[in-house]
Amino acid sequence: MDSRTKNNLHVVETDWDEIEKKIRKHRLKRLRRIAMIVGVCVAAFIGYYVFMQHKSYDEYTVTEEITRSDSSAADYLAYAGGYLKYSNDGASYVSMDNTVIWNQSYEMENPMVCVCESYAVVADRAGETIYVMDEDGLQGEIAVNMPISKIETASQGTVAVLMEESGTGYLSLFDKNGNQLAEGAIHAENSGIPMDIALSSNGKNLAVSIVDISSGSAGSTVQFYNFDTTGQNQIDNMVGTFTYADTVMPELVYADDDTLLAFADNGVYTFTGSSSPKESAMLAVEDEIMSIFYDDSYFGLVYSDTSKDAGRIIKIYDTDCKEQVTIETEFSYDSIGFLDNHEICLLNSGQCSIYTLGGLQKFTCEFEEEIIEVFHESGFRNYVILKRDVTERVRLRLFGSTETGAEAETGTEAETGTGTEAETETETETNTETESGTETETEIQTETEDET
């Protein structure tokens, strides 16, 4: 009996190579399914993004309306996620939902404001007092003894001041508490008349534009000062001087800590480097420049379009003076500038026109009420419109009048195509992957048992 039992036994040999081959095959099949799902999602997102970037709007839905009572003489400036409201008798930091975060009172005839990241400084042109604020309110007051003509601030509250008295320009650098860090004089008979100053956001680099007419024609000089280690080893911290004949440079701005833009009557000059500045790209301009505007990445020049009565040609460049887009318009604007998403906003008291960097007129609208300022909020279609007595948070209508207020209030869900639909898609994808994984494991287990 034992012998017969032993004779009936046989050895089962498992082909592990074949099993591993089938496992790899099913894993590859699963990866292909996942890749296909991801590819469809990416393609859908790209399609949606392209659609949003190439769509024009002329209607909007008001998602929130807030009544204000502002002075008719107030001005507004984007600041720290909200805006800075300032007038002759004070300045306020206001959130986009009209919450007053702080209020600073003063008495000024001609207030001027400079903002750098979380710091804002206010001074009276030809006055002698400077107020330094951040998001928490007043950080310091700086008193000077000569009339102020220009102010600049850095991201840590450093303040550069250009003062003028009896034909002589004076430069001073202060910390936010009013402690003087550096000072110097620019004598008209020796150097010329200072026209503008620019301070880098780190507070280490200062540039001054000086015009000299002593030779009978206007010429300009740009002087660079460095208040870091390099500048301490130089006379008066000066690390560079560049002179240009028959040129006037009325405006300077630091695009970043190492790049200065100098706007001149014959074009735009750029300089790079902080410890040892050098000339970089130059944009030569033959036509008269009507307006200039800029942010930290681009600048725009506006020319008259002689082929049209009220025509304007707007050219946008990056900080290397490479042209990005040309926009032709007959929009009669009172102000023009970049929004915080680099869109170009043209504004007058009753109309608004917004262009993308691709040259598309994204939004245009006429208003019955007077509009003062427009700000961008997070998302493709969210903006804040300041009217004379009302703040409106709005959302551009994707499909004209078919979009309801409830749809507008969904915010980011409607903006990015997420929400319920996206959750359903995600759940479907997850279930598909889970089912695929379960199916694969079941098939592998069955095949292994068959082999055995």
Image: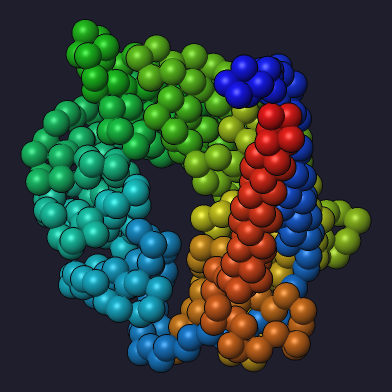
Question: In the displayed image of the protein, which residue is found farthest to the front?
Answer: 1
Image quarter in which the C terminus is found: top right
Location of residue 63 with respect to 263 vertically, above or below: below
Left or right position of 361 against 136? right
Q: Residue at x 21, y 8 (%)?
A: 233
Left/right of residue 222 with respect to residue 285 in the rendered view: left
**Left or right placement of residue 109 versus residue 422 in this view:** left
Specify the quadrant that holds the N terminus.
top right
- Residue 52 spot, x, y in % from top left: 73, 61
In the depicted view, which residue is nearer to us: 226 or 209? 226
Q: Give coordinates of residue 18: x percent, y percent.
A: 74, 21
Q: How is the image coloured?
A: rainbow
Q: Quadrant of residue 73?
A: bottom left
Residue at image location 34% in from the left, 37% down from the top: 201
22 up-or-down from 118: above or below: above
Q: Position of residue 121 (x, y in %)?
A: 26, 54
Indicate the position of residue 389 as horizontal and vertical percent values.
Answer: 44, 89
- Residue at the image point whose x is 52% and y is 32% from the top: 261
**Considering only vertical position in the picture, is 229 above or below 265?**
above
The reply to whether residue 66 is visible in this rendering is yes
| Picture residue at 29% right of the left edge, 42% below the top | 155
Towards the viewer: 23 or 242:
23
Compare residues 167 and 435 and report the one nearer the observer: 435
